[in-house]
Image (cartoon, rainbow, N blue to C red):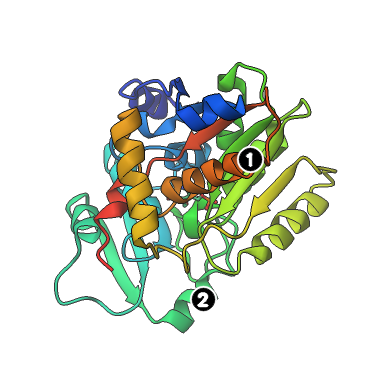
């Protein structure tokens, strides 16, 4: 890994594996652990660091000077990218979906303070940008500029995510993860070597396209992987949508386990997971590891 990245990683904390206890888990004889990727770093936390690590390494190795990417107005990806890039002395530019708001929200304010240039683009232009998947594919890219697709979803992201599996270090029946683009899920599936299942929880309504995309990706890579599923019914009405039931669950969870979670990704996954435990989806004696993917900054989102 590039020495600058090794230096940056020295500031990071360990992602621990913590057991969760509750009367329901005890009654159903389910062992549930939470992999605290949220602890890695206050800003570049969770799957953000996992996904960015080898992309940043690649950009440094290729001696690029600028990173360009895209995201929504509360993008965890751009937030983490801007912060990491500032420390690695890259210039950055972010294409932001939608019109420039009169006042920048806290996420965009952070991003600007960390030196990222913002370019607001219409929803249709944003959709077009989604087509460019490789680091050199963005039209008009200049020498020294490196493109990261939405969410940093590249082959190199899978490699970083895969490192979670080796860190888990206990026998699991299920590894659970929230899904936005399902890149994190794909990275886990690719790296799991035993017969443990990887279970994703879609944060989006109509998430069945994620199943098709992961299948297409594995077919392209000639990977015959069947050890995964995506739960599609715990989206609470759509991306970043929430209701009182979810917020109450999060409040109780945080109090009971003293772990902060957010309602966009990890909150929905854990709600779904406990619901499946309640419904006897899992067999007594099974062990589950749920990945806390961080993203707490995103919960500043006001709906
Ligand atoms: C905090 C958090 N958790 C989970 C996800 C979902 O990850 P993926 O897009 O790889 O499915 C995201 C989105 O990137 C995220 O910001």
Residue 127 tag number: 2
Q: Answer left or right for 32 relative to 144.
A: right
The answer to the question of whether label 1 and label 2 lie on touching residues, with beta carbons closer than 8 A, is no
Label 1, on which residue? 187
Q: Quarter-wise, where is residue 29 in the image?
A: top right
Which callout, 1 or 2, points at the residue further toward the start of the chain?
2
* Residue 200 spot, x, y in % from top left: 61, 47
- The residue that appears at 45% across and 65% down in the rendered structure is 239
Q: Secondary structure at mark 1?
A: helix
- The residue mark sitting in front, 1 or 2, is 1
Nearest the viewer among 41 and 121 is 41
Q: Residue furthest top?
A: 169
Quadrant of the image containing the C terminus? bottom left
Place residue 255 in its image quadrant. top left
| In front of the other: 34 or 169 | 34
Disc 2 CB within 8 Å of nearest ligand 1 atom: no
Q: Which residue appears farthest toward the left when viewing the image?
A: 103
Q: Residues within 10 Å of mark 1 (few under 14, many from 20)?
A: many
Residue at the (39%, 82%) spot, across then down = 122
């Amino acid at each position: 890994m590039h020495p600058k990245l090794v230096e940056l990683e020295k500031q990071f904390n360990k992602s621990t594996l913590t057991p969760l206890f509750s009367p329901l888990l005890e009654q159903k004889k389910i062992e549930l652990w939470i992999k605290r990727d949220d602890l890695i770093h206050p800003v570049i936390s969770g799957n953000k660091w996992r996904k960015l690590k080898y992309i940043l390494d690649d950009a440094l190795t290729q001696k690029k000077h600028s990173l360009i990417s895209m995201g929504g107005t509360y993008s965890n990806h751009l937030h983490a990218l801007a912060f990491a890039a500032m420390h690695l002395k890259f210039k950055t530019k972010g294409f932001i979906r939608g019109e420039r708001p009169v006042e920048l929200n806290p996420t965009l304010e952070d991003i600007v303070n960390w030196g990222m240039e913002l370019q607001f683009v219409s929803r249709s232009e944003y959709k077009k940008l989604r087509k460019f998947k490789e680091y050199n594919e963005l039209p008009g890219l200049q020498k020294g500029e490196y493109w990261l697709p939405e969410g940093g979803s590249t082959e190199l992201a899978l490699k970083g995510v895969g490192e979670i599996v080796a860190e888990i270090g206990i026998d699991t029946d299920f590894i659970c993860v929230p899904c936005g683009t399902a890149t994190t899920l794909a990275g886990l599936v690719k790296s799991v070597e035993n017969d443990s299942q990887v279970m994703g929880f879609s944060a989006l309504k109509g998430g069945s396209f994620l199943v098709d995309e992961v299948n297409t990706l594995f077919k392209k890579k000639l990977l015959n992987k069947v050890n995964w599923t995506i739960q599609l019914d715990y989206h609470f009405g759509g991306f970043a949508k929430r209701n009182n039931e979810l917020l109450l669950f999060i409040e109780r969870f945080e109090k009971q386990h003293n772990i902060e979670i957010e309602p966009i990704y990890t909150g929905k996954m854990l709600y779904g997971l406990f619901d499946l435990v309640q419904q006897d989806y899992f067999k007594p004696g099974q062990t589950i590891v749920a990945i806390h993917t961080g993203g707490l900054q995103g919960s500043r989102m006001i709906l």
